[in-house]
Amino acid sequence: MLTPTEVLSLARVYAGHTELALSSVAKRALGTRNSKALTRIEHGLGVSTLTLERLTLWLLTNWPVDAVWPNEVPGAPIVTVTRPPKRYARIAAGEVPHASKAHCSANN
């Protein structure tokens, strides 16, 4: 698990890259209820271990592709791949979709 200082470092880079305030980053990661979590860390106040873990996981999985990972933070972003729905998987495999009869008979 990352330290509060490391999470704050990540959040600052993310905020600068996306042109968001730290409170907006926290709101995206944790919801409205914990939108001041990064500000608390910044001022030397504590947050719960669960909040710190949620911040860490969110930053790791939502890291911008073109953002530079800070040297002082160990690790790297986590790349997640979501499978497309089955109907799109067939198209991705090269299958050409056919127009439905409802669309073809519009000129009748």
Image (cartoon, rainbow, N blue to C red):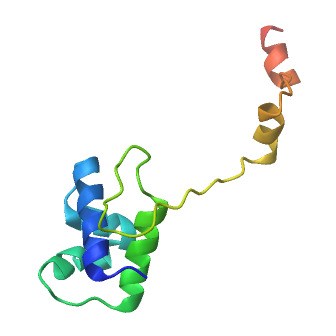
- Where residue 24 appears, x then y in whole percent? 25, 62
Left or right of 6: which side holds 96? right
Q: How many marks?
A: 0
Residue 1 location, x and y as percent?
Answer: 43, 82
Q: Quadrant of the C terminus?
A: top right
81 w.r.t. 96: above or below: below
- Residue at 30% across / 57% down in the picture? 14
Of residues 37 and 70, the one nearer the viewer is: 70
Q: Residue at x 29, y 79 (%)?
A: 34
In front here: 28 or 46? 46
> Residue at 75% across / 48% down in the picture?
85
| Position of residue 37 measured from the top left corner of the image (x, y, whole percent) | 25, 79
- Vertical arrangement, residue 94 with respect to residue 11, above or below: above
Relative vertical location of residue 20 with respect to residue 55 in this rendering, above or below: above
Does residue 44 sit above or below 58 in this rendering? below
17 lies left or right of 28: left
Q: In the picture, residue 28 is in which quadrant?
A: bottom left
Tell me where residue 86 appears, x and y as whole percent.
Answer: 81, 46
Compare residues 97 and 44 and report the one nearer the observer: 44
- Outermost residue on the top side: it is 107
Give the side of residue 34 with respect to residue 81, left or right.
Answer: left
Q: Nearer the viewer, residue 57 or 6?
A: 6
Dividing the picture into quadrants, the one containing residue 22 is bottom left
